[in-house]
Image (cartoon, rainbow, N blue to C red):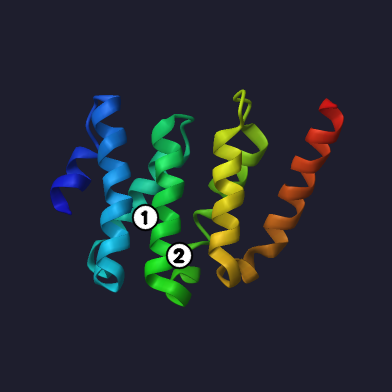
Amino acid sequence: MPLLLQTSQSPEPALREVAVEQLGHLVSIMGLHVRSYLPSLLALARDHLKVVSSVQTHCISLLEHLCKALADEFGQHLPPLMPRLLAILHSDRTERRLPTQRVLHALETFNQNIHNQLHLVVPAVMRLCEQVITNY
């Protein structure tokens, strides 16, 4: 885990992408044993959620794996992440809107953990629906 965390900060984009992707797989294998690495993993996700890239989608996947591994414990870590995730819904202008799709899937995966964040989620999803309707 420490080596993958270090590699995820690499200046080389391809290497960084692979490291973050593999971190997600490792989290799904480790389950609850990931707790000791949680601060580093959450910091990594916060940093990479800001920039549109393929690493961003892998960070969203990493958060999904963390949610599955930690179950109800994950909810307490969502408040600082939620604004960044929802900002992706608003700012994603890519052709296939893959980051938006990944965020929507993550919100589904977060399930009851987003209960306390619904006041942020519902307006963001409604704005997304309005954008889609306006574009057609």
Quick one: quadrant of the C terminus? top right
Q: CA distance from mark 1 to mark 2?
A: 8 Å
Residue displayed at 60% across by 40% down: 100
Residue 66 vertical position relative to residue 3 in the rendered view, above or below: below
Q: Is residue 128 left or right of residue 44?
A: right
Question: Which amino acid type is shown beneath numbered disc 2?
Answer: His
Q: Position of residue 50 (x, y in %)?
A: 47, 37
Residue 36 placed where, x, y %? Answer: 23, 67
Q: Dot 2: what SS? A: helix
Residue at the spot 39% in from the left edge and 71% down from the top edge: 70
The kind of secondary structure element at disc 1 is helix
The part of the image, by quadrant, that contains residue 90 is top right
Q: From what the image shows, is residue 26 above or below residue 74? A: above
Say which label, 1 or 2, has the lower sequence index.
1
Q: At x 45% / y 65%, what residue is drawn?
A: 77
Relative placement, left or right, of 40 versus 78 is: left
Q: Which residue is pictured at 15% across the width and 52% down the height?
A: 2
Compared with residue 38, is residue 44 higher up or lower down, i.e. above or below?
A: above
Q: Position of residue 39 (x, y in %)?
A: 31, 60
- Which residue does the numbered mark 1 point to in the structure image? 42
Three-letter code for the amino acid on which mark 1 is drawn: Leu
Q: Residues within 10 Å of mark 2 (few under 14, many from 20)?
A: some
Q: Nearer the viewer, residue 10 or 107?
A: 107
Residue extending farthest left? 3
Relative placement, left or right, of 14 versus 67 is left
Please identify the quarter of the rendering in which residue 63 is found: bottom left
On the image, which quarter does residue 121 sit in? bottom right
Which of the numbered marks, if any, corresponds to residue 77? Answer: 2
Closest to the observer: 101 or 115?
101
Q: Which mark is residue 134?
A: none
Please say if the residues under marks 1 and 2 sit with CB atoms less than 8 Å apart: yes
